[in-house]
Amino acid sequence: MKLFTKKIYDSAQKQYPLGSDMSQMIVAKFFDPRGSWTWYLMNQDPTDQDYLWGIVDGFEVEMGSFSLRELDSIGYIERDLYFTPITAQECWDRLNNGEHV
């Protein structure tokens, strides 16, 4: 499965200047169907497309950078095709309350 579409690239790069601003949208959700990790993409550096920023729900809920190359290299990471964009704040709050996003 192709993790990024043109729309995802465009939306994530447009939000890059917002950094960790929680009012920006989560533009894509990626998940490990074999495990419990999920990555929620907020933005992407337009000059270094490998650099992604978002919320990661793994051992705990964290915000930080992750790598497009790493996600691609795993081979079985999938994009949630039915994910509806929400604000980063809503995503963060729901995950920290134990809710499914």
Image (cartoon, rainbow, N blue to C red):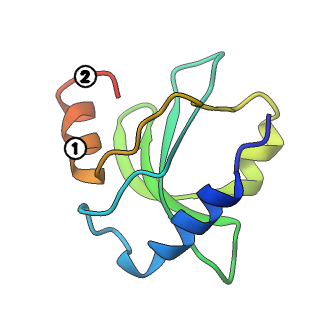
Count of marks overlaid on the render: 2
Helix, strand or loop at mark 1: helix
Report x, y in % for residue 77: 70, 32
Number of other residues with Cα within 10 Å of mark 1, as a class: few under 14, some 14 to 19, many 20 or more = some
5 relative to 94, above or below = below
- Quarter-wise, where is residue 35 in the image? top right
Residue 44 in the figure: left or right of residue 1: left
Q: Amino acid at mark 2?
A: Glu
Q: In the rendered structure, which disc, 2 or 1, sits on the residue that comes first in sequence?
A: 1
Residue 70 in the figure: left or right of residue 27: right
> Which residue lies most toward the top here?
34
Q: Quadrant of the C terminus?
A: top left
Alpha-carbon span between mark 2 and mark 1: 11 Å
Q: In percent of the image, x 66 and y 15: which residue is there?
A: 34
Report x, y in % for residue 51: 62, 68
- Quarter-wise, where is residue 80 in the image? top right
Disc 1: which residue:
90
Q: Are the residues tagged 2 and 1 within 8 Å (C-beta)?
A: no
Q: Which mark is residue 7?
A: none
Q: In percent of the image, x 51 and y 21: which residue is there?
A: 36
Q: Amino acid at mark 1?
A: Glu
71 relative to 59, above or below = below
Number of other residues with Cα within 10 Å of mark 2, as a class: few under 14, some 14 to 19, many 20 or more = few
Report x, y in % for residue 7: 62, 58
Q: Quadrant of the N terminus?
A: top right
Disc 2: which residue:
99
Helix, strand or loop at mark 2: loop
Q: In percent of the image, x 60 and y 56: which residue is there?
A: 8
Q: In percent of the image, x 23 and y 22: which residue is there?
A: 98
